[in-house]
Amino acid sequence: MEKLIEYLPFLIPIVLLELLLMVIALVHIFKHENYRFGTRWLWIIIVVFIQIVGPIIYLTIGRSED
Amino acid sequence: MRGFFAFTKKEFREHFRTYRIIILAAVFFIFGMFSPLRAKMLPEIFSSLDMQGILINIPEPTYLDAYSQFFKNMTQIGLIVVLLVFSGMITNELTKGTLVIILSKGLPRHTVILSKYLVAVILWTISYAAAAVLNHVYTVYLFNQVSGEGVLFSLFCLWLFGVFMLAVIILASTITQGNYGGLLLSAGILILLMVLNMFPKCQRFNPVSLAANNAGLIANTVSVSDLVPTVWITVGLTALGILLSIFIFQEKQL
């Protein structure tokens, strides 16, 4: 276990990037009422629970045009 | 030429505004950092689990594991992300109607295709290079030894496959209409090529080989000369894809 903690400095930037994607997607979800398909709750679940790919799917094909 | 530069500048701004640049940067940074780390940590994750007396012996990971992890991530999720990000290249702007305005002001149609393709290739090249450099630095740091043979050519092959894939995407996006047409058609073409690659006779002529042998090239189980014809075929097919896109877009009713 100590060895895993040793790698923590390497893991932190990765986690931060994942969180960044998630936050960008969540902010967009809350600022918009309509999506190309799906509902707000569906997108929140996808973005929060599917790492990396969830926010990307929302921002590329789920997001409505501004 | 002035039209080309102005349109290219507009393209970059649009990619930024629609989050595409952020997505590419984040994903490729994550893969560059995570792949060697995962290869290094895997045995320790297993040993920290309580296996109830079952012994699992995992050989000490080497830089080869780091690189095969990197290529696995890149060829699976990495290329899917590229597909998602770029699949609406032409159709998005046609459905919004913004492209028609620019074209009616006298911008040649081939400029649109060439400029959009150029921007996509630049974005792919930068994000891929960043991922490759990060992966290499992390691998050298974590594993201390990397033998350089085959690494550069292997990285080049996957880069070229990405460039080919962008040509497929722009062609598919020119042919189809609507929001998801380009995405579905390019995914269909790529799946077809992957199925064809299961037949050994097709592998030599199939661009998919460039994304299937990367780990083998580094481990020296695949030799560079095997893939040289595939490289030229891929270059030819890419050029053909762009020319076809230009031709179809010239004829297309907007």
Image (spheres, coloured by chain):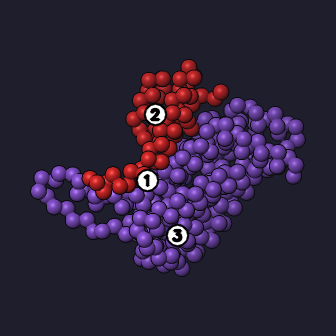
Q: Is residue B179 above or below residue B245?
A: above
The subunit carrying tag 2 is A
Give the amino acid at mark 3: Ser
Q: Residue furthest top?
A: A33
Identify the element where label 1 is drawn.
Answer: helix
> Residue B251 appears at what percent x and percent y?
77, 45
Give the amino acid at mark 1: Phe
Give the drawing colour for chain B: purple
Q: Nearer the viewer, residue A57 or B178?
A: A57
> Residue B219 appears at what percent x and percent y?
42, 74
For image coordinates 54% across by 28% down, the residue present is A27
Image quadrant where one finds the C terminus of chain B: top right
Q: CA distance from mark 2 to mark 1?
A: 24 Å
Relative horizontal placement of residue B165, taking residue B218 as reference (left or right): right
Q: Are marks 3 and 2 on the same chain?
A: no
For image coordinates 54% across by 79% down, the residue present is B225
Task: Name the residue that disc number 1 marks.
Answer: A10
Residue A47's disc is: 2
Q: Which chain is red?
A: A
